[in-house]
Image: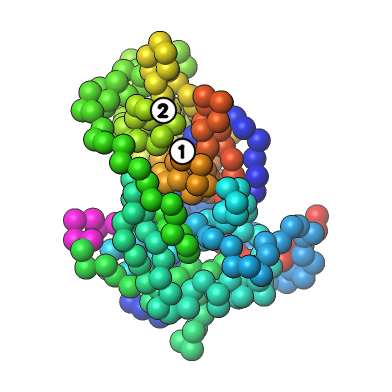
Amino acid sequence: MHQTYPTSRDPHGERTFPTIARRLRAIFGVAVLASILTATAGCDKNAETAEVVHRTSLANKPNVVFLLFGDRSDPRILPVATTIEGQVAPVSLDVQGWRDFDHIYFRPGTSLSLYRDGRSDGEGKIRRGMWDATGPLYKLPRCRSVKPLAALVPRKFESSDVMLERIATSEPLAPAPDRGPVPRSAIDTARAIALKVSQHEGITRNARAGLDLAVFAIHTGATRAPTLVASYIERGGGIQGHPRHLFVLADSTAGGYAPTFVHSADDSLPEFRRYIDHADITGDGVDELLLEGWENGGDSFLLFLRYTNGKWREMARGETSWCADPKRKA
């Protein structure tokens, strides 16, 4: 991941790329499959000169935030970020560093703490790491060294969910307070906020008729009331044509609910946002939001939002390439 400035605008054994790509659609969506191909196309097995970048220290085994994703019968774990003393930092490692990471965090039998909707969701156990005697867990074309994933032991009580998305951590987070149930009226308010902001952003009634609307209401601790999440998105993910997209967060204020984060697609270089989950990974009493982001026909990434001074702001963004090969200098 890399730090970003705040913005007010969202079976087993080796696997070939087509197989892993199908599973990655569970988190990145169909629209982003092409972006993974784009990212891997940049992996050059002849690259020998590495970029000079800050590398994450694994010396004190920092707490790592993961995304658990994929089919419940064979889920995967993807490293997203580290958290140290309330700070979210990128996981930036060279080829050997990723090997070390796999050895430290992805040993078979290692326990992870799982979270769903801001609360503990029990434990998961690593079934196998990225590399073992049978070879790597997956491969990418034209890439000698891929960034590691791990396979998790299937959880039998996940019977209601076919595809999983969970936040996981290498160390337990502080217990979440009981914030009570989310009022049913919050969903209606989220729809009303989405309509109001879409009109302000120039999305007409006819345009909205061709868009999918997703709304959520979640307790984040940003205020005493739930945080509202609403997203208009082109059917099919905006792969073709001039994509229209609007992602909105809203929170309670003295004058009622008001937008606290607005992201709309830009025709010149449209980006999309999709809400995944939330948890207090920094320990400050307010949950961070984990989103998926992607460019139209371009790269995908994961990003965290943090609530500060009455607004949700992007605090860190994940890398787009799954290949760990050193990059050649331009």
Q: Which residues are magenta?
A: 158-163
Q: Tell me if 315 is positioned left or right of 215 in this view.
A: right
Front position in the image: 315 or 18 = 315
Does 161 appear in magenta?
Answer: yes
Does 202 appear in magenta?
Answer: no
The residue that appears at 45% across and 13% down in the rendered structure is: 200
Residue most extreme to the bottom: 133
**Quarter of the rendering containing residue 180:** top left
State whether the magenta stretch is mostly helix, strand or loop: loop
- State whether residue 38 appears in this view: no
Residue of label 1: 286
Give the CA distance from mark 1 to mark 2: 9 Å
Residue of label 2: 223
Residue most extreme to the top: 255
* Crowding at mark 2 (Cα within 10 Å: few <14, some 14-19, many 20+): some
Percent x, y of residue 164: 32, 56
Contact flag, marks 1 and 2 (Cβ < 8 Å): no
The residue that appears at 28% across and 63% down in the rendered structure is: 72
Q: Amino acid at mark 1?
A: Val
Position of 100 relative to 324 (above/below): below
- State whether residue 205 appears in this view: yes
Instruction: Label 2: state its secondary structure.
Output: loop
Q: Amino acid at mark 2?
A: Thr
* Precedes in sequence: disc 1 or disc 2: 2
Front position in the image: 259 or 204 = 259
**Quarter of the rendering containing residue 114:** bottom left
Q: Which mark is residue 275?
A: none
Percent x, y of residue 59: 66, 70
The residue that appears at 60% across and 54% down in the rendered structure is: 84
Percent x, y of residue 293: 50, 42
* On-image quarter of the C terminus: bottom right
The residue that appears at 41% across and 54% down in the rendered structure is: 167
